[in-house]
Image: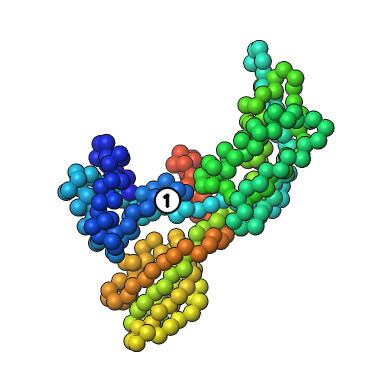
Amino acid sequence: MIPLSKGAEKKISECLHKLTEEDKTFRVSHDALTNELVLTGMSMLHLQVMIGRLKRRFGIDVEFHTPKIPYKETITARAETQYKHKKQSGGHGQYGEVHIRIEPLPRGSGFEFVDEVVGGSIPRQYIPAVEKGIREVLDKGILIGHPIVDVRVRLFHGSFHEVDSSEAAFKTAASHAFHEAFNHARPVLLEPIVNIEVTIPVKFMGEIAGNLSSHRGHIKNMDSLADLQVVRATIPMASIANYETELKSMTGGQGSFTTAFSHYDVVPAHLMQQIVTQHMPLTARMAGKNECR
């Protein structure tokens, strides 16, 4: 959700909080990964009513859309690279060389930086700059601009110049080295997987099961509850962006569902390429379309 009213950014949280106090089925959260305000309600109509109330009562107009999927980036293989940052432009130049190895870590491990430099090939005072340069790339991402996770980086060698070396030079060298290594380490996208529980009249069971499977869902178990059927499955978050509308259409409004985050898993290769293409800058996509063939 994006506020359109001038100066609304400061007061929108307070106003939304008032609405959540009045209606306990209306919830507001902040997604740290996508930096979005996320509104949750009983239905799309419910959200439209609450947004209308926000405008009428508080004079705040907003634009809303389906929440972004908080993908993450990682690697699946080891890679080794070196990069020398060398620049001379009068006076002191810039010089820093780093040799790194990167390798995947178990899911949920985060990031590890290992200093294996011996013999003073990189002076101690520049090591933190190397780590900082890598961490900045982790935050920005490489494939689609989402955080890079579950990677270990080993700094094992490099070189420096007595006059031209600096923290900035080593930070730049580390950033370029990590980019190169990442692209050679079979990078992949990770997508959030959610647990979904769908409650429907028994007569819709076949259609619902088939629909979940078509959305890359995996049914775990089913329970009967009087004349209702409860279906529990895991499914990619991206696959259920419009599930409320689909479920209403399939069941004539007689179905309901709840979701809860489960884990992250690798995006299938053919879908990953589509996602990467969608996140490319428009100028890059246009350039690709204008290529002579």
Q: How many numbered marks does the figure carry?
A: 1
Toward the top, the furthest residue is 91
Toward the bottom, the furthest residue is 226
Name the spot of residue 126 as percent of width and height, x first. 69, 29
Residue at 32% from the left image edge and 57% from the top image edge: 27
Answer left or right for 53 relative to 267: left
Of 223 and 185, which appears nearest the observer? 223
Residue at 69% from the left image edge and 33% from the top image edge: 127
Name the spot of residue 78 as percent of width and height, x first. 71, 50
**Residue tagged by mark 1?**
31
Secondary structure category for the residue under label 1: strand
Answer left or right for 192 relative to 105: left
Residue at 37% from the left image edge and 53% from the top image edge: 29
- The residue type indicated by label 1 comes to Asp
Residue 205, located in which quarter of the rendered image? bottom left
Quadrant that contains the C terminus: top right
Residue 47, located in which quarter of the rendered image? bottom left
Of 155 and 177, which appears nearest the observer? 155
Circle 1 crowding by C-alpha within 10 Å: few under 14, some 14–19, many from 20: some
Q: Give the colour scheme of this rendering.
A: rainbow
Residue at 59% from the left image edge and 54% from the top image edge: 188
Answer left or right for 17 relative to 157: left
Of 268 and 101, which appears nearest the observer? 101
Asked if residue 116 can be seen in this view, the reply is yes
Above-or-below relation of 202 to 260: below
Name the spot of residue 93 as percent of width and height, x first. 67, 18
Toward the left, the furthest residue is 56
Answer left or right for 28 relative to 278: left
Asked if residue 176 can be seen in this view, the reply is no
Toward the right, the furthest residue is 119
Name the spot of residue 109 as percent of width and height, x first. 62, 54
Above-or-below relation of 265 to 128: below
